[in-house]
């Protein structure tokens, strides 16, 4: 019952009218003659926006799957590579500093 009260308050932005019981009984009889489940009209623009968002979500899921496949492919290629071909940046700091073949940046900065 409390949940119904809170739902009513929320639905009507806190604007609830206090009514005598006999008015409530009349309102209950009127509402019982309405069809169940209640029908609500939804604007076409809402339906179109909902469909657009569903299509966009599907497209994003496809892109995510494609990205996952690409990352998996790159990881497999990295695993197959010879470990001598892989250069770790932390190894460059420990290694020879005069070796210019590992210099990062453009050659226009000379």
Image (cartoon, rainbow, N blue to C red):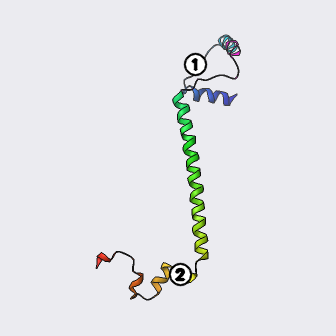
Give the dominant element type of the magenta stretch: helix, strand or loop. loop
Q: Is residue 110 magenta?
A: no
Residue 42 vs residue 34: left or right? left
Residue 62 vs residue 108: left or right? right
Please state the horizontal and vertical placement of residue 55, each as a whole percent of the image. 56, 42
Please state the horizontal and vertical placement of residue 72, each as a whole percent of the image. 61, 65
Which quadrant of the structure image shows residue 98? bottom left
Q: Residues within 10 Å of mark 1 (few under 14, many from 20)?
A: few
Rounded to the nearest angstrom, the CA distance separating label 1 from label 2 is 78 Å
Report which residue position mark 2 lands on: 85
Instruction: Tell me the residue at 57%/26% (across/down).
Output: 42
Instruction: Tell me the residue at 60%/18% (across/down).
Output: 18
Closer-to-camera residue (57/30): 57
Quarter occupied by the N terminus = top right
- The kind of secondary structure element at disc 2 is helix
Examine the rendered structure and indicate whether residue 59 appears above or below residue 91. Answer: above
Report which residue position mark 1 lands on: 17
Residue 27 vs residue 14: left or right? right
Please state the horizontal and vertical placement of residue 11, each as a whole percent of the image. 58, 27
Closer-to-camera residue (109/69): 69
- Which is more N-terminal, label 2 or label 1? 1
Q: Residues within 10 Å of mark 2 (few under 14, many from 20)?
A: few
Magenta segment boundaries in residue numbering: 29-43
Examine the rendered structure and indicate whether residue 64 appears above or below residue 110. Answer: above
Instruction: Tell me the residue at 66%/22% (across/down).
Output: 38
Which quadrant of the structure image shows residue 40? top right
Quarter occupied by the C terminus = bottom left
Q: Which numbered disc, 1 or 2, marks the residue closer to the eye? A: 2
């Amino acid at each position: 019952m409390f949940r119904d009260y809170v739902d009513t308050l929320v639905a009507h932005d806190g604007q609830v009218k206090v009514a005598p019981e006999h008015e409530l009984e009349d309102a209950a009889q009127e509402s019982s003659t309405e069809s169940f489940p209640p029908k609500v009209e939804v604007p076409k623009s809402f339906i179109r926006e909902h469909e657009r968002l569903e299509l966009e979500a599907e497209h994003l899921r496809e892109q995510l799957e494609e990205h996952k496949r690409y990352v998996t492919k790159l990881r497999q290629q990295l695993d197959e590579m010879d470990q001598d071909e892989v250069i770790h940046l932390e190894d460059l700091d420990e290694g020879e500093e005069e070796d210019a073949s590992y210099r990062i940046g453009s050659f226009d900065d000379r």
